[in-house]
Amino acid sequence: MEQRRLAMAVTGAGGTRMARYVLSALVRDDRVGHVDLMVSANGRKLLAHEFGGAETDDPVSTLLGGQSPKVACWDPDREPAGPPSSGSYPFWGMVVVPCALGALARIAQGQANTLIERAADVCLKERHRLVLCVRETPFNLIHLRNMTQVTEAGAVVYPMIPTYYNVPQTVDQMFEEFTARLLGFLGLDQTDYYVWDVPGTAAHRERVGQR
């Protein structure tokens, strides 16, 4: 299987710890050959706040605890012409996690001013997979209309909502479950523990054993 090249963005919404889980999973996956990471200015502020560092800290080190040869980091404000901004750049798709509703609005309106929005715009025009993991509640009518618009344009709105049917016992389990489901949705199937009641899976065997 040819290794995939993916783009990943972190924007200024709470929940950047989820970005750590997702990026770590992508780096571990042999089916992923390269990740172009983009962290907005507000995303850096959230990383500093949630991880206890500084806004000037390297995002890759913050998220992974060190560097990875798979990950290239771009400053979306200072490097708006980075590789994912071009339709000729061969990347498979893009995930924004967490996705601030302001970022979603700019993507919906085609305001491709930074590398994050430009890469998202490229995904839409080239028909690549674009997944926006929004983290906010409740939604107002503007949010809902923007989500409708990006969905009509070809993106997928994938809210950062945990599952409950697996009865998670810790916050880490919620993060792990969401990450597995998200990567599975991206075509990178993970372990089967989150699959509901499919004969032969661990989840099914556990439920049968409980009856």
Image (spheres, helix red, strand yellow):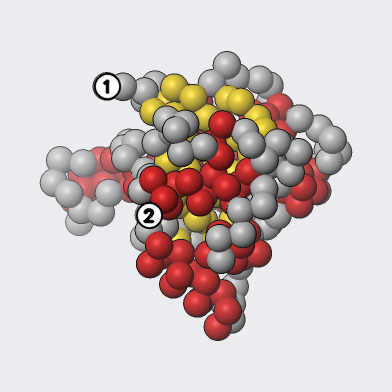
In the rendered structure, which amino acid carries the disc numbered 1?
Met
Q: Quadrant of residue 189?
A: top left
Q: Nearer the viewer, residue 77 or 1?
A: 77
Q: Quadrant of residue 200?
A: top left
Viewer can see residue 164: no
Q: Nearer the viewer, residue 1 or 190?
A: 1
Please name the residue shown 21% across and 48% down the image: 204
Between the residue at mark 1 and the residue at mark 2, the CA separation in whole angstroms equals 31 Å
* Neighbours of disc 1 within 10 Å: few (<14), some (14-19), many (20+): few
Please name the residue shown 52% across and 71% down the image: 146
Viewer can see residue 158: yes
Residue 166 numbered tag: 2
Q: Nearer the viewer, residue 12 or 180?
A: 12
Please name the residue shown 53% across and 64% down the image: 108
Q: Quadrant of the N terminus?
A: top left
- In this rendering, the answer to whether 211 lies above or below 51 is below
* x, y percent for residue 23: 55, 35
* x, y percent for residue 50: 75, 47
Of labels 1 and 2, the one closer to you: 1
Q: Of helix, strand and loop, which one carries label 2?
A: loop
Residue 120 numbered tag: none
Q: Of helix, strand and loop, which one carries label 1?
A: loop
* Neighbours of disc 2 within 10 Å: few (<14), some (14-19), many (20+): some
* x, y percent for residue 124: 43, 52
Q: Quadrant of the C terminus?
A: bottom left
* x, y percent for residue 123: 44, 47
| Residue labelled with disc 1 | 1
Count of residue discs: 2
In the rendered structure, which amino acid carries the disc numbered 2?
Asn
Answer with mark 1 or mark 2, whichever residue precedes in sequence.
Answer: 1
- In this rendering, the answer to whether 8 lies above or below 43 is above
